[in-house]
Image: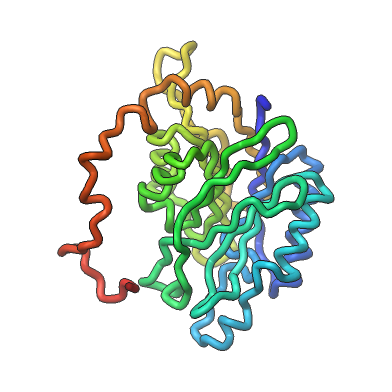
């Protein structure tokens, strides 16, 4: 496969999961008409990234991973023959989780990921954390692609993308719900560059509180033989308005680049990285609201 087309569904959510299901299904159908191989939603689409303070209300918003909302997108993926990355507030104990499921073009679930780095300093203190990162082999028709996931705050830790790269990820799908300004966009650029992989991020548009659109695809390919200097790894940056933005990843170009360039894993020295696995938190980084 030379090109992988990723639809970033930068949409305003509705009032409840039923309305978000209808909006999401319509958007996926449109994305397929545009030629998309993968459709990606913003963070916690089932409830429009809403986290009530009252636990009973929070639990009431959560949907099961095998329930009607999520399974509807599995069936739709098979109907459209298009992979769908759906996001949702997942029923889970002791507290709901911020989750993502990826269905392939046959409607098979290939990845179920829960956000590891929850924002414990904010509303996400009322959520359970995920327990790790994993990579799935995604059938996209003519080819298969190694795909992993991060969710929003995960991208602010270089370890997230690094672990996915070490597991073979070529593409990281990143649902998001926050202002994507120059520094957060620079994080994504850096994660893609240093790991020689692509990162597709889908955000809510302006109009959703604390969001501003600017969904992106960074392909991580910084150098090409025909260029005298470095190239812009940003393939697409959406504006702030609602819309479906189609980003095209040159897959063969990325794979050729990964096979010869110097970043990624070839020259690492993990025997010297022991402090990365230590769990001691020292000043000035001690925070009383950090969940154990």
Q: Quadrant of residue 281?
A: bottom left
- Answer yes or no: is residue 229 visible: yes
Answer with left or right where residue 23 lies relative to residue 3.
right
Q: How many labels does the image show?
A: 0
Q: Which residue is drawn at 73% across and 68% down?
A: 69
Residue 250: image quadrant is top right
| Residue drawn 65% across the image and 73% down it | 63
Comparing 157 with 183, the one in front is 157
- Depth check: give the residue in front, 48 or 66: 66
Q: Quadrant of the N terminus?
A: top right
How far across and down, in percent of the image, does residue 60 sit?
63, 83
**Residue lying farthest to the front in this orientation:** 271
Closer to us: 238 or 199: 199
Q: In this view, does 124 lie above or below 229?
A: below
If the image is split into quadrants, where does the C terminus sit?
A: bottom left
Residue at 69 percent across and 74 percent down: it is: 16
Point out the residue furthest to the left here: 283
Q: Which residue is drawn at 38% across and 71% down?
A: 120
Measured as percent of width and height from the top left, residue 62 is found at: 62, 76
Q: Is 18 placed above or below 281 here?
A: below
The image shows residue 35 at horizontal and vertical percentages of 76, 38
């Amino acid at each position: 496969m030379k090109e992988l087309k990723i639809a970033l569904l930068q949409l305003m959510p509705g009032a409840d999961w039923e309305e978000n299901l209808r909006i999401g299904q319509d958007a996926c159908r449109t994305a397929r008409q545009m030629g998309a191989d993968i459709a990606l939603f913003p963070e916690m689409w089932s409830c429009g990234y809403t986290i009530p303070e009252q636990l009973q209300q929070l639990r009431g918003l959560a949907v099961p991973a095998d329930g009607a909302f999520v399974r509807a997108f599995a069936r739709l993926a098979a109907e459209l023959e298009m992979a769908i990355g759906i996001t949702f507030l997942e029923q889970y104990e002791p507290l709901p989780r911020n989750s993502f499921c990826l269905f392939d073009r046959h409607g098979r679930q290939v990845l179920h990921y829960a956000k590891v780095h929850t924002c414990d300093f904010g509303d996400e203190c009322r959520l359970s954390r995920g327990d790790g990162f994993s990579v799935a082999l995604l059938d996209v028709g003519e080819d298969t692609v190694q795909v992993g996931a991060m969710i929003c705050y995960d991208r602010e830790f270089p370890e997230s993308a690094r672990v996915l790269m070490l597991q073979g990820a070529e593409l990281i799908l990143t649902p998001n719900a926050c202002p994507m300004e120059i520094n957060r966009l620079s994080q994504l650029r850096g994660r893609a560059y240093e790991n020689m992989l692509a990162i597709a991020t889908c955000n809510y548009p302006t109009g959703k509180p604390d969001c501003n659109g600017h969904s992106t695809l960074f392909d991580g390919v910084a150098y090409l033989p025909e260029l005298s200097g470095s190239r812009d790894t940003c393939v697409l940056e959406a504006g702030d308005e609602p819309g479906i933005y189609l980003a095209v990843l040159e897959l063969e170009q990325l794979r050729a680049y990964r096979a010869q360039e110097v970043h990624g894993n070839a020259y690492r020295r993990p025997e010297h990285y022991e402090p990365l696995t230590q769990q001691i938190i020292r000043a000035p980084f001690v925070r009383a609201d950090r969940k154990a």
